[in-house]
């Protein structure tokens, strides 16, 4: 048995002697089941990274292992280019024409050279044409093109279908699925949403969960309608309007509606659904190589689809039993931007990290391929059990790889010569890789084998269409019968005849070049318009036919600036009016034409296919349009103004659009500031008066203390003098001097007592003054508070009108407005709006 045919092992190439710079005879066989610990392929441009990925996928398919491939650039689609006969004519349609020209060769000669190159290359690795044929027969190869019919289209909107699952048992997994759907959808319309912080994400997730729990049907149009009128009025502890106001919901709903109304969006809901079991195995039981070609999508669309596919794989993962075998490989080529390091968190990151962490137990192997290690989240590197590292020139890239590899090697119980690997990684030749499998011990260098697929570089959409020609019809089993084709042609012819009778044309009429005209795109899908009609009529209807009809309208758009520097107003409004032609259009009632139209809606060319109604003469003459433009300018000058609130006492002006409540809040703040300033000034004056009285009171109290002490002393002296006199009297020594001294003592005591009484009286008077000042302050403060409270009642409206020079008509001319013309099953015809026209413009 040759090295390339061992069961359960992938033949990747042969070991490479780094010192001699030679390929050895020792084959490198990688055990397929080791991929359940996931793998990372790293290498700069020209390292052979894409070739190694395709070789790994070829080997997995030969082992009967299905593969799901995310191909953002179109390189892995080369798996479709296998030619068992290796004939030049097989290569000719796929060789690089520019490469042939640069070499001065014809396409045929270049194809011959490429065929010879592949014959020799494969022979050097013991691979024959029989082996290539075996690969072609081992699996069913399909290129899926989401959002396009170039390859096999993919129905991604079925993800909104209510799942048949018990909420009590699967609540956590269902909420994870809802989170992925909402993240993908918001990413598609350019909303960066955090699942725990973003009101957009939280509200949409709540709506979907509400509908799913009720077991009701759900699709994108219904989700948009429920976004405008959610089936609940509270989110958490907040009222709905506080949490996510109506205008914000309308803006988000409009963005989502524009998405599904865009031409070509129907391709997102056609073809095979994202059922992983179906994507893994064909009807005949063979494994599938499901290649999701994404090169035709923009970044937002790629993230949208990748998120949904990863969520689909995550759903599949949840219901799988445990296994040690490899069930399926998820290969993600050029993962840059979809699994970035912290803190970046695109919608693709959460489900991909979940698959890496949980896939092993269910037999899922995730392989990520990228040029720079810095493109990957560190958790992705540390969770990888297999590393294939090609040439890396950037020192930062080498150091990051060596750090992660060193940890992985140490975990496996081995040693790593970091210095040797550092030198080697910067000098590896093309197709030479360092392979480390944590289950196999020390890393080895190897040279990849020759790929059986023709590596011609990224496939273009035209080439994808060519390679899928014939396969798509067989896989869809959707070939049309001749009678059906004839019936369809007859229906188209009948529709055209009816259009002609109604005066409709398949092309817009030719008008003079001086007549301005624009085309408005449809923003309401047919399905949504029909459902709205059903809701109005109160009964379901069946549509037998439909077409998009464009009718001429008068569109006027103007900018009006209201400027009043004295009042602090500098406000500009855009006014839009859309008027349908008819009798009396010469005198336009502009108030009846309110509409929602932005500059982005104005297209100089028709948007999509449709029929066109005839143009009224007044819209086809430039002189009439100029007259209506002047009339519109007069209308703007006389009817558009800005109203603001004003408080003349506080000298406060409001802002345009400010509510009376908000203005009063500002006035309260201003009145409070001015009141506080007046109170402070009055309080300072009063405090000075009180301080003077308090200082007098303190002095008087000190004087009272002194007087009291003097009085006490005089009383003691007088008492002593009386005792002395009594003693002398008993002793017979009384004299006139003694009597005089006693009299003087009594006089001094009387004077000291008078001083004390005077101090007490003064203190009482000063305390009365303090009490009076306090009462005076209370009355003064009450008066100040009352006066400033009264100022809040002095609120009036002031109008700011534009000057003539501040009125500018941006557009006044013909606008083609789309309408759905629907033929019902009972033969009746109805016209349904294909875009919103009512708005809140002034």
Image: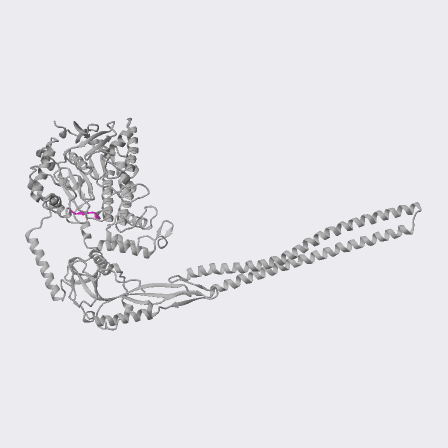
Q: Is 516 on the left-hand or right-hand side of 640?
A: left
Vertical relation: 687 (above or below) 91: below
- Hey, which residue is sitting farthest right in the picture? 732
Q: Quadrant of residue 525?
A: bottom left
Closer to the camera in the image, 640 or 249:
640
| Horizontal arrangement in the rendering, residue 31 relative to residue 732 (left or right) | left
606 drawn magenta? no
Magenta region includes residue 155? yes
**How far from the left and from the top, in percent, is residue 428?**
22, 33
Q: Is residue 83 visible?
A: no
Residue 589, quarter of the rendered image: bottom left
Q: Is residue 298 visible?
A: yes
Q: Nearer the viewer, residue 368 or 493?
A: 368
* Rendered residue at 35%/55% (across/down): 241
The C terminus: image quadrant = bottom left
Taking the spot 20% from the left edge, 68% from the top edge, the residue there is 515
Percent across and percent down for residue 418 are 29, 30
Task: List x then y, in percent, for residue 738.
Answer: 89, 50
Q: Which residues are magenta?
A: 152-157
């Amino acid at each position: 048995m040759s090295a390339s045919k061992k069961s359960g092992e992938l033949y990747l190439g042969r070991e490479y002697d780094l010192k001699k710079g030679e390929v050895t005879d020792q084959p490198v066989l990688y055990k397929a089941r080791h991929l359940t610990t996931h793998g990372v392929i790293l290498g700069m441009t020209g390292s052979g990274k894409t070739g190694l990925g395709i070789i790994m996928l070829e080997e997995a398919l030969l082992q009967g292992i299905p593969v799901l491939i995310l191909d953002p650039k179109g390189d892995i689609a080369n798996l479709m280019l296998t030619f068992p006969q290796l004939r030049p004519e097989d290569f000719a349609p796929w060789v690089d024409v520019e490469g042939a020209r640069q070499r001065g060769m014809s396409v045929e000669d270049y194809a011959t050279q490429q065929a010879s190159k592949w014959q020799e290359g494969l022979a050097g690795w013991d691979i024959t044409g029989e082996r290539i044929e075996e690969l072609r027969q081992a699996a069913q190869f399909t290129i899926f093109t989401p959002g396009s019919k170039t390859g096999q289209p993919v129905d991604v909107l079925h993800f909104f279908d209510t799942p048949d699952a018990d909420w009590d048992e699967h609540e956590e997994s269902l909420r994870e699925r809802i989170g992925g759907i909402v993240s993908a959808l918001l990413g598609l319309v350019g909303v960066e949403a955090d699942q725990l912080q973003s009101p957009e994400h939280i509200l949409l997730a709540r709506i979907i969960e509400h509908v799913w729990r009720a077991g009701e049907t759900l699709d994108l149009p219904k989700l948009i309608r429920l976004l405008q009128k959610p089936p609940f009025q509270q989110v958490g502890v907040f009222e709905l309007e506080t949490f996510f106001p109506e205008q914000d919901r309308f803006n988000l709903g409009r963005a989502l509606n524009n998405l599904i109304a865009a031409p070509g969006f129907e391709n997102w809901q056609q073809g095979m659904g994202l059922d992983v079991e179906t994507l893994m195995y064909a009807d005949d039981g063979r494994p599938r190589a499901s290649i999701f070609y994404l090169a035709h999508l923009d970044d937002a669309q790629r993230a949208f689809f990748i998120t949904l596919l990863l969520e689909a794989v995550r759903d599949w993962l949840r219901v799988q039993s445990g296994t040690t075998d490899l069930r399926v490989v998820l290969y993600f080529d050029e993962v840059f931007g979809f699994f970035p390091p912290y803190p970046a968190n695109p919608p693709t990151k959460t489900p991909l990290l979940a698959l890496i962490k949980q896939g092993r137990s269910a037999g899922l192997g995730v392989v990520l391929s990228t040029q720079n290690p810095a493109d990957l989240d560190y958790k992705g590197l540390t969770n990888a059990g297999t590393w294939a590292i090609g040439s890396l020139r950037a020192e930062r890239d080498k150091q990051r790889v060596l750090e992660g590899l060193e940890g992985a090697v140490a975990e496996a119980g081995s040693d790593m010569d970091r210095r040797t690997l550092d030198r080697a990684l910067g000098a590896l030749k093309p197709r030479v890789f360092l392979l480390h499998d944590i289950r196999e011990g020390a890393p080895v260098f190897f040279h990849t084998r020759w790929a059986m697929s023709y590596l011609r570089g990224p496939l273009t959409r035209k080439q994808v269409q060519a390679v899928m020609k014939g396969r798509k019809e067989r896989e869809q089993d959707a070939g049309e019968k001749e009678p059906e084709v004839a019936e369809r042609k007859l229906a188209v012819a009948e529709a055209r005849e009816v259009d002609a009778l109604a005066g409709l044309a398949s092309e817009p009429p030719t008008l003079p070049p001086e007549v301005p005209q624009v085309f408005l795109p449809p923003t309401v899908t047919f399905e949504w318009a029909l459902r709205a009609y059903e809701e109005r009529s109160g009964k379901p209807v069946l549509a037998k036919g439909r077409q998009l009809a464009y009718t001429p309208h008068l569109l006027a758009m103007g900018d009006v600036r209201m400027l009043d520097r004295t009042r602090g107003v500098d406000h500009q409004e855009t006014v839009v009016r859309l008027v349908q032609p008819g009798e009396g259009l010469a005198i336009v009632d502009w108030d009846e034409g309110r509409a929602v139209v932005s500059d982005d809606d104005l297209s100089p060319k028709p948007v999509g296919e449709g029929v066109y109604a005839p143009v009224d003469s007044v819209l086809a003459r430039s002189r009439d349009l100029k007259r209506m433009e002047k009339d519109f300018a007069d209308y703007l000058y006389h009817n558009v103004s800005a109203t603001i609130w004003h408080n003349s006492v506080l000298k406060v002006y409001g802002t345009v659009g400010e509510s009376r409540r908000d203005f009063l809040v500002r006035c309260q703040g201003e009145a409070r500031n001015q009141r506080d300033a007046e109170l402070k000034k009055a309080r300072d004056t009063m405090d000075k008066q009180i301080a003077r009285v308090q200082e007098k009171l303190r002095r008087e109290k000190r004087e009272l203390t002194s007087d009291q002490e003097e009085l006490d002393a005089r009383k003691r002296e007088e008492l002593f003098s009386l005792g002395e006199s009594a003693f002398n009297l008993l002793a017979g020594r009384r004299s006139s001097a003694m009597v005089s001294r006693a009299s003087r003592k009594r006089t001094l005591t009387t004077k000291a007592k008078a001083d004390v009484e005077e101090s007490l009286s003064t203190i009482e008077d000063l305390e009365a003054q303090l009490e009076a000042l306090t009462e005076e302050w209370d009355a003064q403060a009450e008066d100040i508070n009352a006066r400033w409270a009264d100022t809040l009642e002095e609120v009036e409206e002031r109008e700011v009108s534009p000057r003539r020079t501040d009125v500018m008509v941006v557009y006044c001319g013909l606008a083609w407005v789309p309408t759905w013309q629907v033929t019902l099953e009972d033969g009746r015809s109805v016209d349904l709006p294909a875009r919103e026209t009512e708005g809140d413009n002034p």
